Image: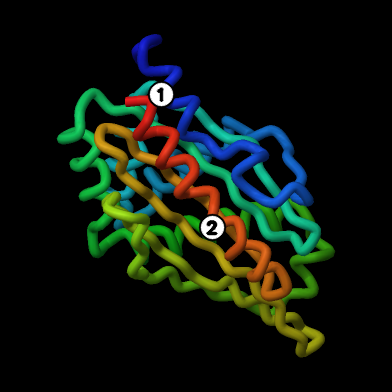
Amino acid sequence: FSSADQPIADQGVIVAGDIPGTWTASPNAAADEKKSLKLAASTKGCTDYVKFAKANLATTHAASDDFSSAAEAQISNHSYVHADAAAATQALDALRSSTVPACLSKVFTTALENELAKDPAARRRIRNYELTMEPVNAALGSYPTVAYKGTVTVNLKSGATQSLNVALIAVQVDRVVLAYSVQAPPTGVNDLNTALNSAPLATATRTSNAL
């Protein structure tokens, strides 16, 4: 970790001015990131994703608040300052691996199972659920970008169906990797798109100016 790099990392996180003023902020739980890495490390087929996550956690980094809209769209991000652009490229290349979509599907599904285990009443209402992550073409100006999206479909025993759109987006700005986690129910997709139209570019621009 480099104290000289901390101001750069801090410029890469989402702030209130990057998204609509109606969104609310809550503290980002730092433990969640390590919990996700631990879960991925114990999941078969996640070697490349773990390589990406470990490389990032070894850097000087910063985390944004978790921002939520009234329609339950959510966005947050982390900013990781690597030693040089080659190291950042290596991390992003690991995330590009063809093994990552299946890994993310397993990790998200296991995380959901763990959450449901804390709420037996909710678990009893569910017949089954499924999630498949897939790569998507995403471009943020000239910055190299890797993105995956998926939909969690929950089928209830009552016959009803609920869904949640999730995505992971990583952007490289020279030697910095900016990683965004987003999710929204169908009713919150418009809110999420509004945030995605402004926040990633704002954070990338500030990061570029800070380097």
Residue sticking out furthest to the bottom: 159
Residue 208 at what x, y percent from top left?
A: 35, 34
Quick one: SS at disc 1? Answer: helix
Q: Is residue 113 left or right of residue 1?
A: right
Residue 96 at what x, y percent from top left?
A: 25, 57
Residue under numbered circle 1: 8
Q: The residue under label 2 is which amino acid type?
A: Leu
What residue is drawn where x is 33% and y is 43%?
50
**Looking at the figure, which quarter contains the C terminus?**
top left
What residue is drawn where x is 58% and y is 32%?
31
Q: Are marks 2 and 1 in contact (CB under 8 Å)?
A: no
Which numbered disc flags the more N-terminal residue, 2 or 1?
A: 1
Decide: few, some or many residues near mark 2? Use Cα within 10 Å; few <14, some 14-19, many ≥20: some
Closer to us: 156 or 142: 142
What residue is drawn where x is 49% and y is 70%?
150
Residue under numbered circle 2: 196
Q: Is residue 164 left or right of residue 122?
A: left
Q: Is residue 15 left or right of residue 169?
A: right
Quick one: SS at disc 2? Answer: helix
Q: The residue under label 1 is which amino acid type?
A: Ile
Residue 19 at what x, y percent from top left?
A: 64, 49
Residue 26 at what x, y percent from top left?
A: 73, 37
Q: Is residue 78 left or right of residue 174?
A: right
Instruction: Relative to 126, say whether 197 is above or below.
Output: above
Tally of marks = 2
Instruction: Relative to 207, say whether 119 is above or below.
Output: below
